[in-house]
Image: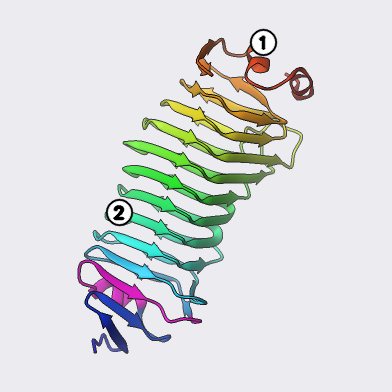
Amino acid sequence: MVTWGLMLAALSAGAVSLDCGASIEDAVGSAAPGSVVRLAADCAYAGPLTLRPTAPVVLEGTPGARIVGGLIVEGAGALTLRALTVDAEVVALTHVGEGALTLDRVTLRGGTGLHVESAARVRIRDSRLRGVDTGLWVQGARALHVRDSVVEGGEVAVVVRGVREAVHIGHSRLRAEGTGQASAAVFVQGPAPTDLVGNRIEHVSRTARPAPAVVRAGGSVVLDDNLLIGDRVGVVFDGGGTLGCNRYEGVLLRSEGAHARACGRDLAPDSLDWRRRVGAGPSVAAKAGP
């Protein structure tokens, strides 16, 4: 039996089970390197909670367990959230720590699903992030890797700013339902090379103004083997980019200030011929207008 002024039961070496009324904050902060802290089944833990891991630790959910009120992650220790559900009215999960963050089979629901403002590496797999405004917001991280996940936002699904090394989003569904002119499914700004590969990227505009499904400002982006669905504009490149063999539904392609490459061919920006060659047929181009 381990005690932090609450009841904890050791399941095995490096694994600890929390009672329903136990403190997740104390358990994570005191966990030894490599420990697994497991929540009680069918228990709602009240937040907001601030976690300060000092060593690599896993916080694991169980059937029916969830955190209500949000999580804030600080500290230098790496944290993995596994099979966990977090609900909040504002931000479901905020990460401002130095340690790496991994989401594995995690569901986040809030005004923003996940907000990262740190120099950490962020890895997301097989997870669902839902925000009334934004599903995923990452600023200043070292690297971002998203795979096999669903990210949904009211205005923007994914916002990435100032990531230093690399951004990879693959085999995921990214969806936004915007009402503003600047809304988009994906917005990326910064120096890091960016790969968007094998995704379904969808933007449903609630206004007559053009709103892109994918936006890239600065740096270089590779967009390949995606399905892009939108009301008007599909892609805006500003600063360079590579268009691979993508599929398009209901969108007009646009390249601003950059040349692109589609299926191995160099393409001149802002030409109607270019738009048609990469998949937006004459009827789509005519519908979109200038």
Q: Quadrant of the N terminus?
A: bottom left
| Magenta stretch contains residue 30 | yes
Cβ–Cβ below 8 Å for labels 2 and 1?
Answer: no
Can residue 69 be seen from the camera position used here?
yes
Q: Which residue is mark 2?
A: 100
* Secondary structure at numbered mark 1: helix
At horizontal 49% and vertical 68% (from top left) the residue drawn is 85
Q: Which residue is mark 1?
A: 273
Q: Which residues are magenta?
A: 24-43
The answer to whether 26 appears left or right of 220 in the picture is: left
Residue 33's image quarter?
bottom left
Q: Nearer the viewer, residue 184 or 60?
A: 60
**Which amino acid, mark 2?**
Ala
As drawn, 184 above or below 269: below
Q: Nearer the viewer, residue 207 or 204?
A: 204
As drawn, 286 above or below 121: above
Q: CA distance from mark 2 to mark 1?
A: 45 Å
Can residue 140 be seen from the camera position used here?
no
| Magenta stretch contains residue 271 | no
Percent coordinates x, y for residue 102 in the rendering: 36, 56
At horizontal 44% and vertical 46% (from top left) the residue drawn is 146
Percent coordinates x, y for residue 60 in the rendering: 38, 70
**Which amino acid, mark 1?**
Asp
Percent coordinates x, y for residue 141 in the rendering: 34, 45
Q: Residues within 10 Å of mark 1 (few under 14, many from 20)?
A: some
Residue 199's image quarter?
top right
Percent coordinates x, y for residue 232 in the rendering: 71, 30
